Amino acid sequence: MNNPRYSRNRLYVKSEEQSLIKDTKILLGGAGIGSIIAECALRFGFENITIIDGDRVELSNLNRQTYVQTDIGKNKAECLAKRLMDINPDASIVYHNSYADENNMEALIKRHEIAINALDFKSKIPFEFDEICKKYNIPVLHPYNFGWAGFLAVVKPNGIQLSQLSEEPRGFELRMAEYVSRYGEFWNIPNKWLEKVIEEYRNEDNILPPPQLSIASWITAGYCVNVMYNLITGKEIKFFPKFYLSSIFFDKS
Protein backbone atom coordinates (compact mmCIF):
# COMPACT_ATOMS: atom_id res chain seq x y z
CA MET A 1 0.00 0.00 0.00
CA ASN A 2 1.53 3.31 -1.10
CA ASN A 3 -0.81 5.35 1.09
CA PRO A 4 -0.08 4.76 4.80
CA ARG A 5 -3.72 5.65 5.54
CA TYR A 6 -4.73 2.26 4.16
CA SER A 7 -1.65 0.24 5.15
CA ARG A 8 -3.74 -1.96 7.47
CA ASN A 9 -5.97 -2.93 4.54
CA ARG A 10 -3.06 -4.99 3.19
CA LEU A 11 -3.57 -8.71 2.51
CA TYR A 12 -7.31 -8.06 2.36
CA VAL A 13 -7.17 -5.43 -0.39
CA LYS A 14 -4.64 -5.31 -3.24
CA SER A 15 -2.95 -2.03 -4.16
CA GLU A 16 -4.67 -1.87 -7.54
CA GLU A 17 -8.02 -2.57 -5.84
CA GLN A 18 -7.40 0.25 -3.36
CA SER A 19 -6.96 2.62 -6.31
CA LEU A 20 -10.25 1.43 -7.83
CA ILE A 21 -11.99 1.96 -4.51
CA LYS A 22 -10.62 5.48 -4.19
CA ASP A 23 -11.81 6.52 -7.64
CA THR A 24 -15.30 4.95 -7.52
CA LYS A 25 -18.04 7.57 -7.31
CA ILE A 26 -20.68 6.76 -4.70
CA LEU A 27 -24.05 8.48 -4.36
CA LEU A 28 -25.63 8.35 -0.91
CA GLY A 29 -29.34 9.06 -0.98
CA GLY A 30 -30.30 9.61 2.65
CA ALA A 31 -27.96 10.34 5.56
CA GLY A 32 -29.69 8.38 8.32
CA ILE A 33 -28.34 4.83 8.24
CA GLY A 34 -26.38 6.28 5.33
CA SER A 35 -24.24 8.22 7.81
CA ILE A 36 -22.79 4.99 9.22
CA ILE A 37 -22.37 3.52 5.74
CA ALA A 38 -20.56 6.64 4.52
CA GLU A 39 -18.11 6.60 7.41
CA CYS A 40 -17.40 2.89 7.00
CA ALA A 41 -16.92 3.39 3.26
CA LEU A 42 -14.59 6.36 3.72
CA ARG A 43 -12.43 4.53 6.26
CA PHE A 44 -12.21 1.60 3.83
CA GLY A 45 -10.97 3.91 1.09
CA PHE A 46 -13.95 5.22 -0.87
CA GLU A 47 -12.97 8.88 -1.29
CA ASN A 48 -15.58 10.12 -3.77
CA ILE A 49 -18.94 10.40 -2.02
CA THR A 50 -21.96 12.57 -2.79
CA ILE A 51 -24.57 13.00 -0.05
CA ILE A 52 -28.13 14.17 -0.55
CA ASP A 53 -30.53 14.67 2.36
CA GLY A 54 -32.83 17.51 3.40
CA ASP A 55 -33.36 16.33 6.99
CA ARG A 56 -31.97 17.93 10.12
CA VAL A 57 -30.43 16.01 13.02
CA GLU A 58 -32.82 15.11 15.83
CA LEU A 59 -32.11 13.75 19.30
CA SER A 60 -33.76 10.43 18.39
CA ASN A 61 -31.16 9.94 15.62
CA LEU A 62 -28.28 9.68 18.08
CA ASN A 63 -29.05 6.09 19.14
CA ARG A 64 -27.96 4.71 15.74
CA GLN A 65 -26.53 7.39 13.42
CA THR A 66 -23.08 8.96 13.38
CA TYR A 67 -24.14 12.42 14.62
CA VAL A 68 -23.30 14.03 17.96
CA GLN A 69 -25.21 16.18 20.44
CA THR A 70 -23.98 19.46 18.98
CA ASP A 71 -25.30 18.47 15.54
CA ILE A 72 -28.93 18.56 16.69
CA GLY A 73 -30.94 20.99 14.56
CA LYS A 74 -28.30 21.17 11.84
CA ASN A 75 -28.49 19.74 8.31
CA LYS A 76 -27.61 16.05 8.24
CA ALA A 77 -25.87 16.18 4.87
CA GLU A 78 -23.64 19.06 5.94
CA CYS A 79 -22.83 17.53 9.34
CA LEU A 80 -21.97 14.21 7.75
CA ALA A 81 -19.78 15.84 5.11
CA LYS A 82 -17.88 17.72 7.83
CA ARG A 83 -17.34 14.54 9.82
CA LEU A 84 -16.05 12.71 6.77
CA MET A 85 -13.70 15.56 5.89
CA ASP A 86 -12.40 15.54 9.48
CA ILE A 87 -11.55 11.86 8.96
CA ASN A 88 -9.96 12.37 5.54
CA PRO A 89 -9.48 15.98 4.38
CA ASP A 90 -8.15 14.76 1.03
CA ALA A 91 -11.43 13.04 0.12
CA SER A 92 -13.91 14.48 -2.37
CA ILE A 93 -17.11 14.87 -0.37
CA VAL A 94 -20.03 16.72 -1.96
CA TYR A 95 -23.25 17.36 -0.08
CA HIS A 96 -26.68 18.72 -0.91
CA ASN A 97 -28.93 19.99 1.88
CA SER A 98 -32.03 19.05 -0.07
CA TYR A 99 -34.36 16.12 -0.59
CA ALA A 100 -34.11 13.92 -3.65
CA ASP A 101 -36.98 14.76 -5.99
CA GLU A 102 -38.03 14.67 -9.64
CA ASN A 103 -36.12 17.90 -10.33
CA ASN A 104 -32.67 16.93 -9.09
CA MET A 105 -32.37 13.13 -9.06
CA GLU A 106 -31.29 12.45 -12.62
CA ALA A 107 -28.60 15.16 -12.60
CA LEU A 108 -27.20 13.79 -9.35
CA ILE A 109 -27.42 10.09 -10.12
CA LYS A 110 -25.96 9.92 -13.62
CA ARG A 111 -22.47 10.97 -12.52
CA HIS A 112 -22.03 8.00 -10.20
CA GLU A 113 -21.12 4.33 -10.39
CA ILE A 114 -22.85 2.92 -7.31
CA ALA A 115 -25.90 4.29 -5.50
CA ILE A 116 -27.11 3.72 -1.96
CA ASN A 117 -30.85 4.19 -1.60
CA ALA A 118 -31.40 4.98 2.07
CA LEU A 119 -34.32 7.32 1.35
CA ASP A 120 -37.45 7.33 3.49
CA PHE A 121 -40.43 5.63 1.90
CA LYS A 122 -42.76 8.60 2.39
CA SER A 123 -43.49 8.87 -1.34
CA LYS A 124 -42.58 7.11 -4.59
CA ILE A 125 -39.25 8.94 -4.74
CA PRO A 126 -37.22 5.84 -3.63
CA PHE A 127 -38.75 3.84 -6.50
CA GLU A 128 -38.07 6.66 -8.96
CA PHE A 129 -34.49 6.84 -7.65
CA ASP A 130 -34.04 3.18 -8.61
CA GLU A 131 -35.61 3.71 -12.03
CA ILE A 132 -33.09 6.43 -12.87
CA CYS A 133 -30.26 4.20 -11.66
CA LYS A 134 -31.61 1.47 -13.93
CA LYS A 135 -31.53 3.91 -16.84
CA TYR A 136 -27.84 4.62 -16.22
CA ASN A 137 -26.93 1.00 -15.43
CA ILE A 138 -26.07 1.77 -11.80
CA PRO A 139 -26.48 -0.94 -9.14
CA VAL A 140 -28.41 0.18 -6.06
CA LEU A 141 -27.87 -0.87 -2.45
CA HIS A 142 -30.92 -0.84 -0.16
CA PRO A 143 -29.86 -0.96 3.51
CA TYR A 144 -32.34 -1.63 6.32
CA ASN A 145 -32.12 -1.53 10.09
CA PHE A 146 -33.97 -4.47 11.64
CA GLY A 147 -32.78 -3.74 15.15
CA TRP A 148 -30.90 -6.90 16.04
CA ALA A 149 -30.21 -7.68 12.37
CA GLY A 150 -28.41 -5.89 9.57
CA PHE A 151 -30.06 -6.23 6.17
CA LEU A 152 -29.04 -5.36 2.62
CA ALA A 153 -30.78 -5.90 -0.71
CA VAL A 154 -28.81 -5.17 -3.88
CA VAL A 155 -30.78 -4.24 -6.98
CA LYS A 156 -29.23 -5.09 -10.34
CA PRO A 157 -30.07 -2.58 -13.10
CA ASN A 158 -31.53 -5.26 -15.37
CA GLY A 159 -32.82 -7.43 -12.53
CA ILE A 160 -35.81 -7.61 -10.21
CA GLN A 161 -36.65 -4.22 -8.72
CA LEU A 162 -37.90 -3.60 -5.17
CA SER A 163 -41.08 -2.09 -6.60
CA GLN A 164 -42.04 -5.62 -7.67
CA LEU A 165 -42.41 -6.44 -3.98
CA SER A 166 -44.82 -3.52 -3.60
CA GLU A 167 -45.40 -0.27 -5.50
CA GLU A 168 -46.95 1.39 -2.42
CA PRO A 169 -44.32 3.41 -0.51
CA ARG A 170 -46.30 3.78 2.72
CA GLY A 171 -45.34 1.01 5.09
CA PHE A 172 -42.75 -0.39 2.68
CA GLU A 173 -40.22 -1.00 5.48
CA LEU A 174 -42.78 -3.22 7.23
CA ARG A 175 -43.47 -5.13 4.02
CA MET A 176 -39.76 -5.73 3.57
CA ALA A 177 -39.49 -7.08 7.11
CA GLU A 178 -42.46 -9.35 6.40
CA TYR A 179 -40.76 -10.55 3.20
CA VAL A 180 -37.62 -11.44 5.16
CA SER A 181 -39.71 -13.23 7.78
CA ARG A 182 -41.60 -15.27 5.16
CA TYR A 183 -38.33 -16.10 3.41
CA GLY A 184 -36.95 -17.50 6.65
CA GLU A 185 -40.07 -19.56 7.25
CA PHE A 186 -39.91 -20.98 3.73
CA TRP A 187 -36.31 -22.13 4.16
CA ASN A 188 -36.96 -23.43 7.69
CA ILE A 189 -34.80 -20.76 9.33
CA PRO A 190 -37.48 -18.83 11.24
CA ASN A 191 -36.68 -15.55 12.96
CA LYS A 192 -39.14 -15.59 15.84
CA TRP A 193 -37.78 -12.36 17.31
CA LEU A 194 -38.38 -10.55 14.00
CA GLU A 195 -41.90 -11.94 13.75
CA LYS A 196 -42.58 -10.69 17.28
CA VAL A 197 -41.30 -7.18 16.49
CA ILE A 198 -43.40 -7.08 13.31
CA GLU A 199 -46.52 -8.03 15.25
CA GLU A 200 -45.87 -5.51 18.03
CA TYR A 201 -45.10 -2.75 15.53
CA ARG A 202 -48.40 -3.40 13.73
CA ASN A 203 -50.15 -2.84 17.06
CA GLU A 204 -48.44 0.49 17.70
CA ASP A 205 -49.72 3.90 16.68
CA ASN A 206 -49.24 3.82 12.90
CA ILE A 207 -47.64 7.27 12.83
CA LEU A 208 -44.59 6.00 14.73
CA PRO A 209 -41.42 5.35 12.72
CA PRO A 210 -40.01 1.79 12.84
CA PRO A 211 -37.87 0.92 15.89
CA GLN A 212 -34.15 0.70 15.09
CA LEU A 213 -30.92 -0.06 16.96
CA SER A 214 -27.29 0.94 16.50
CA ILE A 215 -26.37 -2.75 16.18
CA ALA A 216 -28.11 -3.13 12.83
CA SER A 217 -26.69 0.15 11.50
CA TRP A 218 -23.11 -1.05 11.89
CA ILE A 219 -23.78 -4.57 10.59
CA THR A 220 -25.53 -3.13 7.54
CA ALA A 221 -22.74 -0.62 6.91
CA GLY A 222 -20.24 -3.48 6.82
CA TYR A 223 -22.41 -5.33 4.33
CA CYS A 224 -22.67 -2.26 2.10
CA VAL A 225 -18.94 -1.59 1.99
CA ASN A 226 -18.13 -5.26 1.40
CA VAL A 227 -20.67 -5.44 -1.44
CA MET A 228 -19.35 -2.23 -3.02
CA TYR A 229 -15.85 -3.70 -2.91
CA ASN A 230 -17.13 -6.89 -4.56
CA LEU A 231 -18.98 -4.92 -7.23
CA ILE A 232 -15.98 -2.91 -8.38
CA THR A 233 -13.56 -5.85 -8.23
CA GLY A 234 -15.84 -8.26 -10.08
CA LYS A 235 -16.44 -10.61 -7.17
CA GLU A 236 -19.70 -12.48 -6.64
CA ILE A 237 -22.63 -10.89 -4.80
CA LYS A 238 -26.29 -11.73 -4.23
CA PHE A 239 -28.91 -9.66 -6.02
CA PHE A 240 -32.53 -9.11 -5.01
CA PRO A 241 -34.77 -11.11 -4.44
CA LYS A 242 -31.88 -12.67 -2.51
CA PHE A 243 -30.46 -10.55 0.29
CA TYR A 244 -27.95 -10.29 3.12
CA LEU A 245 -29.14 -10.68 6.71
CA SER A 246 -27.07 -11.05 9.85
CA SER A 247 -28.04 -11.44 13.50
CA ILE A 248 -26.96 -13.61 16.42
CA PHE A 249 -30.68 -14.21 17.11
CA PHE A 250 -31.44 -16.99 14.64
CA ASP A 251 -33.99 -19.48 15.91
CA LYS A 252 -33.32 -23.12 15.05
CA SER A 253 -36.61 -24.52 16.26
Image: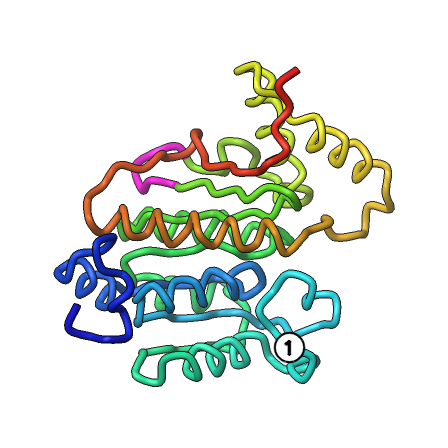
- Asked whether, in this view, residue 207 is left or right of residue 57, the answer is right
Q: How is the image coloured?
A: rainbow
- Location of residue 123 in the rendering, given as x and y in whole percent from the top left corner: 61, 52
Quadrant in the picture for the C terminus = top right
Q: Is residue 85 above or below residue 214?
A: below
Q: Residue at the location (32% across, 56% down)?
A: 114
Magenta span: predominant SS is loop
- Location of residue 40 in the rendering, given as x and y in whole percent from the top left corner: 43, 63
Q: Residue at the location (71% across, 31% down)?
A: 193
The residues colored magenta run: 155-160
- Location of residue 172 in the rendering, given as x and y in whole percent from the top left corner: 63, 41
**Closer to us: 109 or 241:** 241
248 within the magenta span: no
Q: Residue at the location (48% across, 43% down)?
A: 152
Q: Is residue 80 above or below residue 150?
A: below
Judging by the rendered image, the residue that carries numbered circle 1 is 68
Residue 179, quarter of picture: top right
Q: Residue at the location (52% across, 38% down)?
A: 246
Count all numbered tags in the image, as a single digit: 1
Residue 49, quarter of picture: bottom left
Q: Is residue 117 above or below residue 26?
A: above
- Asked whether, in this view, residue 139 is left or right of residue 22, the answer is right
Quadrant in the picture for the N terminus = bottom left
- Location of residue 117 in the rendering, given as x and y in whole percent from the top left corner: 47, 54
Mark 1 secondary-structure assignment: loop
Q: Looking at numbered disc 1 in the image, what kind of residue is underneath it? A: Val
**Closer to us: 67 or 249:** 249
Other-residue count near label 1 (Cα within 10 Å), few / some / many at <14 / 14–19 / ≥20: some
